[in-house]
Image: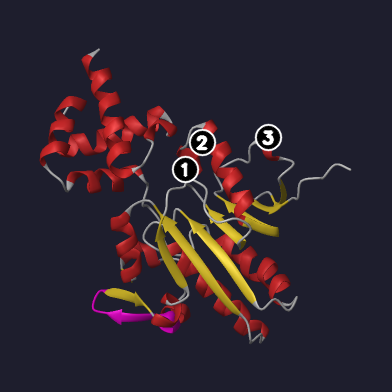
Amino acid sequence: MDDIKEFSRLKEKIHKERGLDVNQYKENYLKRRLAVRMRALGLRLYGEYLKVLEKDSGEMAVLLDKLTINVTQFFRDPEVFIVFENDILPQMLSSGMKKISVWSAGCSSGEEPYSIAISIEETAEKLGIKGFDYEIHATDIDEAIIYKAIEGKYEGHTLDNVAASRRNKYFIKDGGFYRIKDSIKKKVKFIRANLMKPYLKEQFDFVFCRNVIIYFSRELQKNVLLYFHEALKKGGIFFMGKTETMLLEYRDKFKCINIKERIFTKLEEEKGE
């Protein structure tokens, strides 16, 4: 019983100090992520872990990193980006649009927003389209991971899906690392933001939030999907993770345009006479 109370105290502490309401996570997921960190420290009880958090100011940042799923790579689920580059972007760019706005929600260490930027650059070049601009808002609640994304320094398997020609074109080799070039960096604006709260309204042509909301409670999923709908412009497009499912309550807000890759377009609400 005491450990149940300490679990509640732990959730309250995270919310109070970092603004992350972990009650909105699925409980089994939350306990699994906490267990990973507690095992690393040789702890069994939530009360023991609370004492560590109170004594070590840096531990909260480590815990937040474990809770917010910072597992990603460039062009994750490559098929999504193939559809983006071959079908969706050409249609939008060929319409004469002068600026594209993108929101990468839950951007982690930056691989997704930088991948989106590379896709836009490559598609525009392939089509011979000039005279347009684009901006990518990349948001995450984890401040430490945002700083890593801004640095833009990568190694290992995170680059497995980047073709050699693209590595040479958009990265600078730095010892055992690859640094994203400034020409791409300047197109991505990294911002600390909480998905559990509304962001901008009717601002974006595309919203990417993949492999994030699957860990949220159903109630939070409903709220977050509403925020994405509100953030999109008329006819804007939403990309969700391949393991995620659009809630039935949102059939009147999103129309599926690619079921395999989980891509949806925003529907406007019908107005009564």
Task: For the residues labelled 2 and 3, say whether their Cβ atoms are less than 8 Å apart.
Answer: no
Return the x and y of residue 217 as percentages of the image width and height: 49, 32
Return the x and y of residue 206 as percentages of the image width and height: 61, 61
> For the point 48% across and 59% down, which residue is it?
76
Question: Which element type, helix, strand or loop, lies under badge 3?
Answer: helix
Quick check: 251 above or below 144? above
Task: For the residues labelled 1 and 2, say whether their Cβ atoms are less than 8 Å apart.
Answer: yes
Which residue lies under the disc numbered 2?
220
Amino acid type, label 2 = Leu
Amino acid type, label 1 = Met
Which residue lies under the disc numbered 3?
249
- Which residues lie in the magenta part? 168-176
Disc with the residue nearer the chain's start (2 vs 3): 2
Quick check: 202 above or below 52? below
Which residue lies under the disc numbered 1?
196
Return the x and y of residue 120 as percentages of the image width and height: 57, 74
Q: Residues within 10 Å of mark 2 (few under 14, many from 20)?
A: some
Question: Which element type, helix, strand or loop, lies under badge 2?
Answer: helix
Cα–Cα gap, marks 1 and 2: 7 Å
Disc with the residue nearer the chain's start (1 vs 2): 1
> For the point 31% across and 70% down, which residue is it?
151
Residue 57 shows up from this direction: yes
Q: Residues within 10 Å of mark 3 (few under 14, many from 20)?
A: few
Cα–Cα gap, marks 2 and 3: 13 Å
